[in-house]
Image: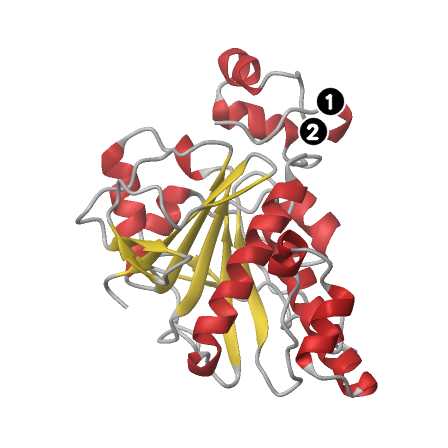
């Protein structure tokens, strides 16, 4: 697995991630670089997520909860996926404001703002102010400081094993775009704002997470039994699983709580099918639909 190749200044000790893992081991490596970690593949991550979110919004928007929808950035790193979701949402709101101001019809707006098919596919749709804002949940056992530095949001130090055992973080902060609180002195601790075994369930415990996004991390799980346990648990709590990686690992099998989703036809496909996947700047994006929510 590679979270990108960069110099030590951006949290990468050596140019080769394989060398880093061989010398330090995965856990020790991320302990060393967690506070300064950056994924240099952010442009590809962002483009993939914009394409996915545009398609998801077009197909799912009428069914999205009228108050909010939850996005879980699992193994969040320094927040590449979170930043992409936030930028997509904000761009959609700006597009709506521009449309209202210009009083232009859709075709005129598209001709001016979308010069080619590739750019057109990535432009967020206009999002009206009465539509729900994304509420971010984030977890990573190593990069909480890097995540907070980049996003201003709170990341819980949950591992894949913690999540497989039923633990999930609470909302990282207020929903994206919400006004800041005047009471900034009160900061929830991981213990007080984590849900899972041994903690009182929050008010939104029964709410389904709309999507789990895992960027450049899921194939760190080497044992199929551990991957199954994690994915099955997530399938009982989330509707969509979005996997971003520099390759097509890990292999997700039938019977693990998910079906592979063809983003183009918006329909189920076989796990082995390559159709309906996204590829931007050498970043692969695969989408799965839960069979348990």
Residue contact at pointers 2 and 1, CB within 8 angstroms: yes
**Residue in the image at 78% along x and 68% along y:** 112
x and y percentages locating residue 272 in the rendered image: 26, 40
* Front in this rendered view, residue 206 or 118: 118
> What is the CA distance from the residue labelled 2 to the residue labelled 1?
5 Å
Q: Residue at x 24, y 64 (%)?
A: 292
Q: Where's the C terminus, which quadrant?
A: bottom left
- Residue 123 visible in rendering: yes
Q: How busy is the neighbourhood of tag 2: few (under 14 within 10 Å), some, or many (20 plus)?
A: many
State left or right for residue 230 relative to residue 13: left
Q: Residue at 62% of width from left, 42% of height from top?
A: 44
Q: Nearer the viewer, residue 290 or 146?
A: 290
Q: Position of residue 101 (x, y in %)?
A: 82, 86
Against 24, residue 98 (above or below) is: below
Q: Secondary structure at mark 2?
A: loop
Q: Nearer the viewer, residue 50 or 27?
A: 50
Depth check: 26 or 132 in front?
132
Q: Is residue 190 visible?
A: no
Tell me the element at label 1.
helix
How many marks do you count on the picture? 2
Q: Which residue is mark 1?
A: 8
Q: Which mark is residue 11?
A: 2
- Measured as percent of width and height from the top left, residue 73 is found at 52, 54
Residue at image coords 74%, 74%: 109
Left or right? Give the position of 253 relative to 7: left
Q: Position of residue 228 (x, y in %)?
A: 25, 43
């Amino acid at each position: 697995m590679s979270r990108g190749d960069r110099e030590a200044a951006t949290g990468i000790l050596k140019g080769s991630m394989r060398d880093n893992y061989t010398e330090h081991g995965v856990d020790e490596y991320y302990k060393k670089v967690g506070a300064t970690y950056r994924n240099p593949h952010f442009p590809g991550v962002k483009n993939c997520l914009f394409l996915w979110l545009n398609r998801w919004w077009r197909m799912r928007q009428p069914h999205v909860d009228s108050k909010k929808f939850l996005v879980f950035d699992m193994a969040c790193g320094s927040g590449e996926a979170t930043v992409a979701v936030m930028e997509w949402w904000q761009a959609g709101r700006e597009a709506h404001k521009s449309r209202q101001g210009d009083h232009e019809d859709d075709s005129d707006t598209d001709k001016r703002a979308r010069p080619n098919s590739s750019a057109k596919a990535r432009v967020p749709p206009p999002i009206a102010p009465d539509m729900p804002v994304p509420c971010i949940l984030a977890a990573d056992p190593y990069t909480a400081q890097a995540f907070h530095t980049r996003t201003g949001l709170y990341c819980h130090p949950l591992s894949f094993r913690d999540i497989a055992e039923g633990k999930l973080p609470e909302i990282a902060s207020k929903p994206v775009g919400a006004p800041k609180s005047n009471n900034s002195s009160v900061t929830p601790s991981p213990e007080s704002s984590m849900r899972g075994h041994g903690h009182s369930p929050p008010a939104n415990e029964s709410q389904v997470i709309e999507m789990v996004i895992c960027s450049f991390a899921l194939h760190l799980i080497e044992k199929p039994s551990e991957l199954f346990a994690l994915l099955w648990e997530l399938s009982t709590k989330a509707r969509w699983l979005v996997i971003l990686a520099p390759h097509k690992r890990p292999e997700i099998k039938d019977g693990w709580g998910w079906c592979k989703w063809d983003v183009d036809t918006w329909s189920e496909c076989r796990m082995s099918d390559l159709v309906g996947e996204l590829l931007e700047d050498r970043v692969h994006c695969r989408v799965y639909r839960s069979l348990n929510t």
